[in-house]
Image (spheres, helix red, strand yellow):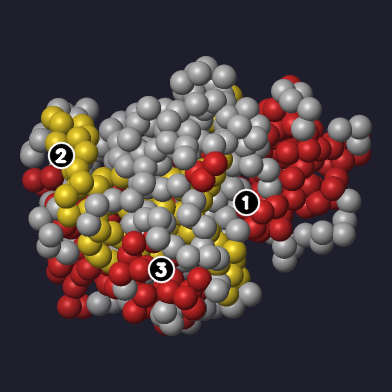
Amino acid sequence: MNIKDFAKLIDYSFMDELNADPDAKPHGDEHSPRQVFSGHYVPVSPTPITDPQYIAHSKTLFADIGINESLAGSEAFKQIFSGNLTEVEAPIRKYGWATGYALSIFGTEYYDQCPFKTGNGYGDGRAISIFEIVNNNRRWEMQLKGAGPTPYCRGADGRAVLRSSVREFLAQEHMHALGVPTSRSLCLYVSSSDKVKRPWYSEGSMSRDPDILIDNPVAITTRVAPSFIRVGQIELFGRRARKNEHPAALQELEKIVMHLIQREYADEINPDLSIHEQCLLLAAEFAKRLIKLVSNWIRVGYCQGNFNSDNCAAGGFTLDYGPFGFIEKFDPYFQPWTGGGEHFSFWNQPLAAQHNFNSFVEAIRPLLINNNAANIELDNIKNSFADSMQQSLEKMWSEKIGMPYFDADLVGRLLGLMVKSSADYSMFFRQLSDIPADIKDLTNSFYKPLDPMLTQDWTDWLEKWHASLNQTGQHQDDIVASMKSINPKYSLREWLLAPAYQQATLGDYTSLRELQQVMIEPYAEQKHHEAKYFRLKPAEVNDIGGISHMSCSS
């Protein structure tokens, strides 16, 4: 496959079916912040990075899309996916699109984050979708992150640094391999000369906030999903329709919702149904996906860190790997982002999801105007979210300990003991998957030694657990296999990521590529990597800024 064959797969349903901003400049010349009052997108040409160098690509995604891996190293492909569309030939267009969205934090609407205090300037500040690929009966949207400023850049430079690009690329690879719904990584390129200054932490700093400005290489990672429609995007049009901000506001809400259904829910929702019926099915299906997503986050120890409505994909997958982190020492209120607060901590993710779902429901409600029965049904869907989430979490906890049913006492005591013992979340559950007979077989997953009382508590718990497993009638080998299929052995820990991106700034991608290979097989034993990657967090990086915590990752 060459670039001409690749171009035959390209489509532009978002731009062709939805409304462009009527005030947009021609040819995508939109690189300064301004208010956008209507339309679903602004045409924007990406700003290419200088002298792009290949770093990595996703073999699994290339295969899933059905395109040849050799493209990743070709000059034409590299130019396109490092933001240079100036030389492309039809059917590829020389510009893509950026979208606006609203912001809700834990269910509260915000406007002041928009530089104009109106909500009309908030959106894709450095993410530009350049086209869609249609192949193997699937549609994939290609979005460049770090491709320069858009009207939503709020005065920033629109760039992504190598550090955050490496983190996002590897996280998307890892999450997909974990079986967690996610946007995907296609490829990663870095400029050999472009740099930008960003606040970060000096070596060994324990400061809560960055204490220095450093030069960072500029990079572009391409993330891929069926669409990048966010809850915040639906919210923006829902707010405008609710307030009747312009004559086409309700129509624009209907068009974006119908487009969302077409792109993300075509298998579940019949387009011949009335708009009221489609909206109700959409709410119900999105609730299922969001509940499943967050249950998976808890299962694998992932914390989104900043789960605002604008970071919540309306397709029900993980989006925006900014201040994310994988939990190590089990702390229910683990939060890697210093600006995130307890409300976006590990344990509060189900509640944050519920708030985002509520925002979504209220955004689509204007489409049910004058239909009392539909509004009542929508409220029923909204009000059932918490119970459905609880049921999903209970099932997840049961599976993590090999039980076919939920035992609240067994799970509750286990989690309490893990906190008291400073257990490493992923290591502990992986070792528990071997169904150890004695607590001694688990102690190397604890960050502190056990005292006699805690040892006895663990012994009592193990005895009850073994008795409960025996009562289920399951064969032990089947339990072990089942537990190991959902309790990963390898986790993308920040102290593993940091050396990979630090070495990458020097042009050495060895650690990055090895980490990629390990993290795309997180359930495999990989004995040759065990000593390096399956171990407790080293004490010397405890409380270090950029590893134990971070203020941002841009």
Q: Residues within 10 Å of mark 2 (few under 14, many from 20)?
A: few
| SS assignment at label 1 | helix
Height in image: 296 above or below 3? above
Residue position for label 1: 15
Tag in front: 2 or 1: 1
Residue at point 15% right, 39% down? 215
Does residue 117 appear anywhere in the picture?
yes
Residue at point 30% right, 69% down? 75
Quadrant including the C terminus: top left
- Give 552 or 124, whichever is nearer the viewer: 124
Q: Amino acid at mark 3?
A: Ala
Residue at point 39% right, 38% down? 149
Residue 177: which disc?
Answer: 3
Spatial CA distance of label 2 from label 3 is 33 Å
Residue position for label 2: 215
In-image side of 448 versus 168 (left or right): left
| SS assignment at label 3 | helix
Q: Earlier in the sequence, mark 2 or mark 1?
A: 1
Quadrant including the N terminus: bottom left
Q: Hey, which quadrant is residue 515 in on the image?
A: bottom left
Height in image: 479 above or below 301? below
Spatial CA distance of label 2 from label 1 is 36 Å
Tag in front: 2 or 3: 2
